[in-house]
Amino acid sequence: MAKLKIGIIGTGGIAHAHLNSYKAIEEVEVAAGCDIIEGKAAEFFKKNNMPDAKGFNSKEEMLKNVKLDAVSVCTYNSTHSECAVFALENGLDVLCEKPLSVTIEQANEMLKAEKKSGKILSVGFQPRYDANWQKIGEIIKSGALGKIYYVQTGGGRRSGMPGSPSFISLEKGGAGALMDIGCYSLDFAMHSIGYPKPLTVSASSFGYLGRKEYGDDFEVDDFTGAFIRLEGGITLDFRMSWKMHMDTAGDFIFLGTEAGLKVKQPSLGTWGGAWDGPVGEVRLMHDMFGKPTETLIPLDDNHGPGLFEKKVRAFVDAVINKKSAPIPTSQIIYNQAIIDGIIRSGRTGKEVDVVIEKI
């Protein structure tokens, strides 16, 4: 069987994680990559001792010269949409780094291109492959909590602010902590409770500490908080930070009519608090014989490859075996609609409606 030929669009920091994961999969050959910075893609492969992989200065040049089966999109947040749409229109399956896009309009264009192409577009949320993340979803789906009415995302970094222009530039990043790591906690919340439709968003975003550190170059949020009303009478209380004068904005909690679930971060260090990997201690808060009771949920070990590699392996398996996208756009569009609403509400200082186009 011929190897699956992969291209990487954008050869910056996160591309290394994609490359290393692909290299661990026997059925795959990373055949090419491209980057808008001249010579960067060629240097990327040179540093990784891959003389047969071709580096190009544009996605158009790459697809013109190398026959590929699929691509990873590892570019700035603001260009995820154009790169994914281009690849889909050229008959390629796509693994897109998180977040899916910046605006809901971009996300809609990606979904339309995916449906028209007949190819798959999967989104890069590796925490879904954590055994305990999955266990939390199973507990909620079992009905043990009763009707869920409130979810708090919690977390947030004490001091873990990336300074690269790709993160702190509004044009490139689209937003700051919200877009970079807030998308993880939104995915955790929404996937765990079965994707109720978002209705309204009221949000505030701040950049005080970012501007203090980077001056006028800092154009995005270092802290964002929001209340999101969801169908079914559920409120989602969202908060996320790159930097704040607090060790955490709280635990991740799910409140139900029969029980509650408290999820702690595994670490609160400089780069902790992002919900981008395994979860920490999980406790079920319930009543037993009329008394408030806490049950510590036993945590499972994550066997086999790391979460990032599991994400890439799931995508490769879906492409080879003609399966549906492992992390589908039909789910992530809800997350993106919330992010879009948070941005709009933060800019206007008003609550905004969330409208999701039927595609």
Image (tube, rainbow, N blue to C red):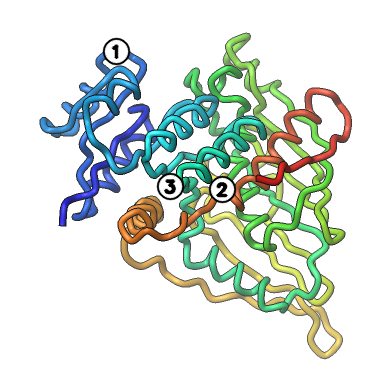
Q: Residue at x 43, y 34 (%)?
A: 89
Q: Is residue 210 left or right of residue 48?
A: right
Q: Which residue is mark 1?
A: 38
Task: Give the residue at the far front of this rendering.
Answer: 116
Image height of 241 relative to 93, above or below: above
Image quarter hosting the C terminus:
top right
Q: What kind of residue is marked 1?
A: Glu
Q: Where, by quadrant of the figure, is residue 203 drawn?
A: top right
Q: Residue at x 60, y 73 (%)?
A: 138
Q: Is residue 137 left or right of residue 306?
A: right
In the image, 312 versus 294, the foreground residue is: 312
In the image, 182 versus 320, the foreground residue is: 320
The answer to whether residue 242 is seen in the rendering is no
In the image, 290 versus 82, the foreground residue is: 82
Q: Which residue is mark 3?
A: 119
Q: Is residue 59 left or right of residue 79?
A: left
**Tag of residue 329:** 2
Q: Residue at x 16, y 52 (%)?
A: 2
- Considering the numbered disc 3 on the image, is that residue within a helix, a strand or a loop? loop
Q: Separation of disc 3 and disc 2 at Cα?
A: 12 Å
Q: Where, by quadrant of the figure, is residue 12 drawn?
A: top left
- Considering the numbered disc 1 on the image, is that residue within a helix, a strand or a loop? loop
